[in-house]
Image (cartoon, grey):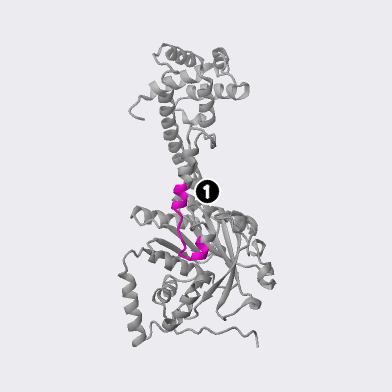
Amino acid sequence: MNQIDDQYLMTCLLKGMIEDKDYALTVAQSFEERYFDTAVMAEIFKSISYHVGKHNALPNRDIVINSISKDLRDEVISLFELADSTDFSVAQNYDWLLEQTNLYLKDRAIKRAVVDAVHLIDNKEDIQQIKDIIENALCKDIRIDLGLNYFDVWEERLRRIFRSSDNRIRTFYPVLDELFNGGFPPYTLNMFIAKIHGHKTNIMTNIITRQVMNGVNVAMATLEMSEDMYAQRFDANFANMDINRIYLKGSHRKEFLKRYTEIIKTDGRANLFIKEYPTGKASVAEFRIWLRELKMRGLLPHIFYCDYISLMKPELKAKGDMYQDGKAISEELRALGWEFGIPIVTVAQINRAGTFLDFESLDMNSIGESFGIPATADSMIVQGADEDDMVYRNELKYKVVKNRLGGRVGHIGKWYFDNKSLRIYDETEIDLWIEAAKRSGDERLIYQGNE
């Protein structure tokens, strides 16, 4: 408390509450009775808070005195007399009083939260509630946010927007970055949707590969594959070699090790962390612990990926309702991005009805599990085959169905994928895709239909 005597602070606080209506309102809205160490201060707070809240005016002192139990009235009178005799001007020291009151509030809130948490543990109640109790205590603040004063703070606002735009994490796919105004902004939830075996994991793997090679640190949580199995996809992608042959003895293994060593030594290469979680058992709570561990070691990633959202569980107790649970998970993921100041990217499957639709008809309604998920997402891209528009066999269409990042909704483009290396290219990179076949050994065949 900046070495301010508690008794002196309580006297100043009381003086503020009986002399300044705005200060009394501020304290009433932020404090709880149990934050005060003495019963008499708790009773005074309760009486003044009730009166100010109901009548929008400070109560007469006699009202306060007579609203408190008789056995405490002498103490109340003594405290009022002490406040009157204390040489402290509320008006002249208002900012100091607010600052000290805020420090006292935060101190008492966290101490009460710890006591409540111990009570929950002792009574073997749902310990997930502890997180909410502690977080609510940490958020206690007497400073009230009045929102954005649009004209008065325009310089600060635009500076903040420009900085946010500069902090976008590029995908390093030319078309995608154009659609997203430069990449994924911090605090956003971004999704790719496709059928089973629809290259959901592959598109994330490819974006990650490009990001890592361009200095972007990445963390990937996998709920479906082991860490080693996921790493194999990156091995093939980085080396641009056939994933089924890179580990074979002889020339294939030697060539892979040569290329992989070159990747490791590349200037500007960033870090990639892959962590496996049990399918259907992990929640944002586990991801938060991991990210905090990385942060404490100075390794906080620039972006976080999760494969995938439908295999997660809500952080708090599941409601058993598919819509509510899906919505809760998506909101928790997005909040995780806000907490660490990074974008979140995940994938989901197209629902059963969507599997019978042609590509042009797929939209946000086609997501499996819960419509609460797309309601929360900031960007969503649907991937799927469109046989009527295929030139090469290894083509995949994508459509932007939601885009808070750049406003370009409805755009349809093409991915070109390599079955051997699992690499994916966009429509501006078709020459690179054709050239890459010389290294991966994949084929670039014209699509002949189903016959």
Q: In percent of the image, x 41 and y 62: which residue is there? A: 218
Q: Where is residue 57 in the image (x, y as percent from the top left)?
A: 58, 19
Q: Can residue 309 be seen in this view?
A: yes
Location of mark 1 (residue): 125
Q: Where is residue 156 in the image (x, y as percent from the top left)?
A: 46, 39
Side of 195 where 92 appears, left or right:
left
Q: Can residue 316 be seen in this view?
A: no
Instruction: Please tell me which residue lies in front, 170 or 375.
Output: 170
Q: Is residue 252 magenta?
A: no
Q: Find residue 407 and report its image quarter.
A: bottom right
Q: What secondary structure is marked by label 1?
A: loop
Instruction: Please tell me which residue lies in front, 362 or 430.
Output: 430
Q: Is residue 338 above or below residue 106?
A: below
Which residues, given as a range, are shown in magenta?
162-177
Q: In this view, does 16 lie above or below 197?
A: above
Dot 1 crowding, Cα within 10 Å, few <14, some 14–19, many 20+: few
